[in-house]
Amino acid sequence: MTVIRVRAKRIVDSGKNAVARWWSKKYNLPSNHELFLERTLGDLHQEMVEDLLVEKLSLEKRIVDGEDSGGHLFHDLNEVNKALGETGSDTGDELWDKWEQEIAEGKIPDLDEMPFDAEN
């Protein structure tokens, strides 16, 4: 492995690359800009996670409001969950978890499906 590749792999594995790419996209500035360099990696990472959590809430609301006829929002939500390190069924909502599993399998969930009513 070349020295450049080893250095690049070390940066990617550390997560610094993901933070730098997120920051550059958010602020439309290069990651060698002084505003990026003067902040700690911890502060940058926390800001990135905060943005992901806000995006997650927004996507969930839009899906519940019926704005996801093509399943694209579910795909985006799945990507946000992956970025947050969340996997599988940790929502506590069985139907939501089923939909997320179907998305992970590449299927489009039936959003008209109703939760199981144990009393009927």
Image (cartoon, rainbow, N blue to C red):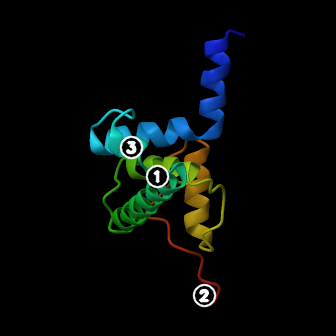
User: Which disc is residue 120 wearing?
Assistant: 2
> CB of mark 3 within 8 Å of CB of mark 1?
yes
- The Cα–Cα distance between marks 1 and 2, rounded to whole angstroms, is 50 Å
Quadrant for the N terminus, please: top right
Quadrant in the picture for residue 63: bottom left
- Marks 2,3: beta carbons within 8 A: no
Structural crowding at the residue carrying mark 2, measured as other residues with C-alpha within 10 Å and reported as few (<14), some (14–19) or many (≥20): few
Q: Position of residue 100 (x, y in %)?
A: 57, 56
- Point out the tag, 1 or 2, that comes first from the N-terminus: 1
Where's residue 57, x and y in %? 41, 66
Mark 1 burial class by Cα count in 10 Å: few <14, some 14-19, many 20+: some
* Image quadrant where one finds the C terminus: bottom right
Which disc number belongs to residue 36?
Answer: 3
Identify the residue at horizontal 50%, vertical 46% (top origin).
79
Under mark 1, the amino acid is Leu
Q: Which residue is mark 1?
A: 44
